[in-house]
Image (spheres, rainbow, N blue to C red):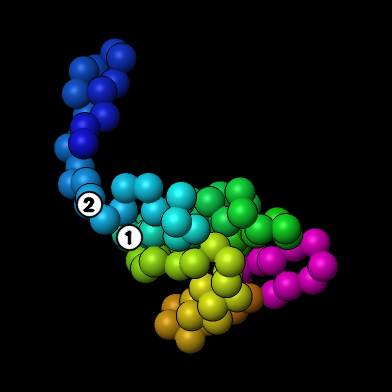
Amino acid sequence: AVEVLQRSGFGEFTEVYLAELGAWQRGQLIFRNTPLSEVASDLNRYGEVSVKVDTQIENMKVSGTFDVANLGFLFDGMQRNLPVRIEQDEKEITILSK
């Protein structure tokens, strides 16, 4: 895939993975070296609570495939594999630096 920019022409070429096409229709979120800020933005479309990221770690990269019906697994995995901690209440989930 390539992004075409109106003023400057072609942008950066990126690889497209066929297995990822339509993942959202299958209830999956797929991240490839995606900044936590973008992950939170995607999660906010699916969850019942707001997801926020501490600005200190908003550029930390995340990779993986996650089921939107089980986002708890995603947050548990983040805490086990990244230097982050999760704080949660009824209205909000916050991803913080450890």
**Vertical arrangement, residue 29 with respect to residue 78, above or below:** above
Q: Position of residue 85 (x, y in %)?
A: 59, 78
**Badge number at residue 33:** 1
For the C terminus, the quadrant is bottom right
The residue stretch that appears in magenta: 87-98
Q: Disc 1, disc 2: CB below 8 Å?
A: no
Is residue 69 at all visible to an observer of this figure? yes
**Vertical arrangement, residue 89 with respect to residue 16, above or below:** below
Who's the residue at 53% across and 51% down the image?
42
Q: Nearer the viewer, residue 82 or 74?
A: 74
Which residue bears the numbered disc 2? Answer: 17
Local packing at callout 2 (Cα closer than 10 Å; few below 14, some 14-19, many 20+) is few
What is the secondary structure assignment of the residue under circle 1? strand
In space, the residues marked 1 and 2 are separated at their CA atoms by: 14 Å
In the image, is 73 to the left or to the right of 5?
A: right
Who's the residue at 79% across and 71% down the image?
89
What is the secondary structure assignment of the residue under circle 2? loop
Q: Position of residue 32 (x, y in %)?
A: 32, 59
- Residue lying at the far bottom in this picture: please name it: 80
For the residues carrying marks 1 and 2, which lies nearer the camera in this image? 2
Who's the residue at 21% across and 18% down the image?
9
Q: Nearer the viewer, residue 71 or 9?
A: 71
Q: Three-letter amino acid code at disc 1?
A: Asn
Q: Position of residue 51 (x, y in %)?
A: 65, 59
